């Protein structure tokens, strides 16, 4: 993990980030923006991501790498998202790296 720089990103802004999602106990990710070669973008005003990831991102700083442990209630619930995320999953380990933050970002082309 790695500390970020500056202030926490303001909720009026947006963020480009990469995420690698793992189901607890598995070594292969169920999702990876890095493997897709496409960063994710989040406008804090129009949140449409997993609540646990959102809560982690709003506490991060630019350049930070964090490991977020997301319980089912803040992710896919007790039903999971078969076949990649099983029912009753204990938790989801997600490595999230903030790359750039700016309230004017419209597209992200990060590597």
Image: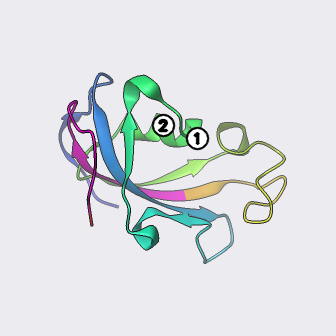
In this rendering, the answer to whether 53 lies above or below 19 is: above
Which residue carries the number 1 mark? 50
Q: Is mark 2 on a helix, strand or loop?
A: helix
Q: What element carries label 1?
A: loop
Q: Residue at left 76%, top 42%? A: 77
Depth check: 33 or 80 in front?
33
Quarter containing the C terminus = bottom left
Judge whether 32 appears above or below 72 on screen: below
Q: Does the magenta stretch include residue 20?
A: no
Residue 40 in the image: above or below residue 102: below
Report the side of 104 relative to 35 (left or right): left
Say whether marks 2 and 1 touch (CB < 8 Å).
Answer: yes
Percent of width and height locating residue 47: 48, 30
Q: Left or right: 45 with respect to 7?
A: right
Q: Quadrant of residue 9?
A: top left
Which mark is drawn over residue 54? 2
User: What count of labels does the image hold?
Assistant: 2
Tell me residue 13's x, y (percent).
27, 28
Give percent across and percent down for residue 14.
Answer: 30, 34
Structural crowding at the residue carrying mark 2, measured as other residues with C-alpha within 10 Å and reported as few (<14), some (14–19) or many (≥20) = some
Q: Does the magenta stretch include residue 108?
A: yes
Nearer the observer, 109 or 47: 109
Read off the magenta span: 94-110
Q: Distance between the residues labelled 2 and 1?
A: 6 Å
Residue sitting farthest toward the left = 6
| Residue ID at (36%, 57%) | 39
Quadrant location, the N terminus: bottom left
**Which residue is pictured at 73% across the width and 65% down the height?**
84
Q: For this view, does 8 lie left or right of residue 82?
A: left
């Amino acid at each position: 993990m790695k500390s970020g720089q500056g202030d926490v990103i303001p909720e009026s802004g947006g963020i480009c980030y990469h995420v690698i999602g793992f189901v607890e106990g598995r070594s292969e990710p169920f999702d990876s923006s890095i493997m897709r070669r496409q960063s994710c973008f989040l406008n804090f005003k129009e949140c449409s991501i997993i609540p646990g990831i959102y809560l982690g991102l709003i506490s991060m700083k630019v350049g930070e790498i964090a490991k977020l442990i997301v319980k089912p209630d803040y992710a896919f619930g007790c039903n999971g998202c078969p076949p990649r995320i099983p029912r009753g999953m204990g938790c989801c380990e997600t490595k999230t790296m903030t790359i750039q933050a700016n309230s004017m970002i419209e597209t992200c082309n990060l590597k």
